[in-house]
Image (cartoon, helix red, strand yellow):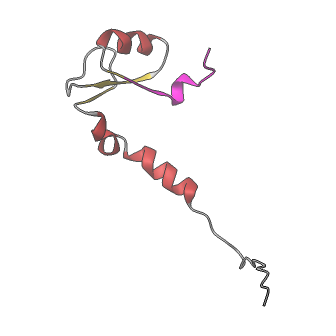
């Protein structure tokens, strides 16, 4: 229905039942609120605020895609009336 690639999708939830169901559909699962992995859980995070430490590769790929190189100077025309 959402037309997502389940192999490139992280599913975050604090319900083990939802996590296990999502795992059956092929999603990579992240249990939030526990540091203990359980059956059907790929990752466990005590807090959603630990995402950067748990998945540093996500931020590396974002920063690489934001790197822009400019091959020439850009001229901007500014009209001035005196």
Please give left or right for residue 70 compared with residue 22 in the image: right
Q: Quadrant of the N terminus?
A: top right
Asked whether residue 8 is drawn in magenta, I would say yes
Say which residue appears at 42% left-offset and 46% top-offset. 57
Say which residue appears at 30% left-offset and 20% top-offset. 14
Q: Which residues are magenta?
A: 1-12
Percent position of residue 80, x then y: 77, 84
The part of the image, by quadrant, that contains residue 22 is: top left
Say which residue appears at 52% left-offset and 26% top-offset. 7
Say which residue appears at 78% left-offset and 79% top-offset. 77
Q: Residue furthest bottom?
A: 82
**Is 52 above or below relative to 43?**
below
Q: Quadrant of the C terminus?
A: bottom right
Percent position of residue 73, x then y: 71, 79
The part of the image, by quadrant, that contains residue 70 is: bottom right
Percent position of residue 42, x then y: 34, 24
**Is 56 above or below relative to 4?**
below
Please give left or right for residue 26 compared with residue 18 in the image: right
**Is 7 above or below relative to 58?**
above
Q: Nearer the viewer, residue 8 or 48?
A: 48
Please give left or right for residue 77 compared with residue 13 in the image: right
Percent position of residue 75, x then y: 75, 79
Circle count: 0
Q: Residue furthest front?
A: 82
Asked whether residue 11 is drawn in magenta, I would say yes
């Amino acid at each position: 229905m959402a037309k997502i690639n389940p192999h490139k999708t992280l599913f975050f939830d604090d319900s083990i039942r939802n996590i296990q169901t999502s795992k059956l559909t092929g999603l990579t699962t992240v249990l939030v609120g526990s540091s203990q992995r359980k059956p059907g859980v790929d990752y466990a995070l005590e807090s959603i605020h630990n995402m950067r430490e748990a998945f540093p590769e996500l931020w590396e790929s974002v920063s690489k895609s934001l790197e822009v190189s400019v091959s020439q100077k850009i001229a901007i025309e500014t009209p001035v009336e005196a």
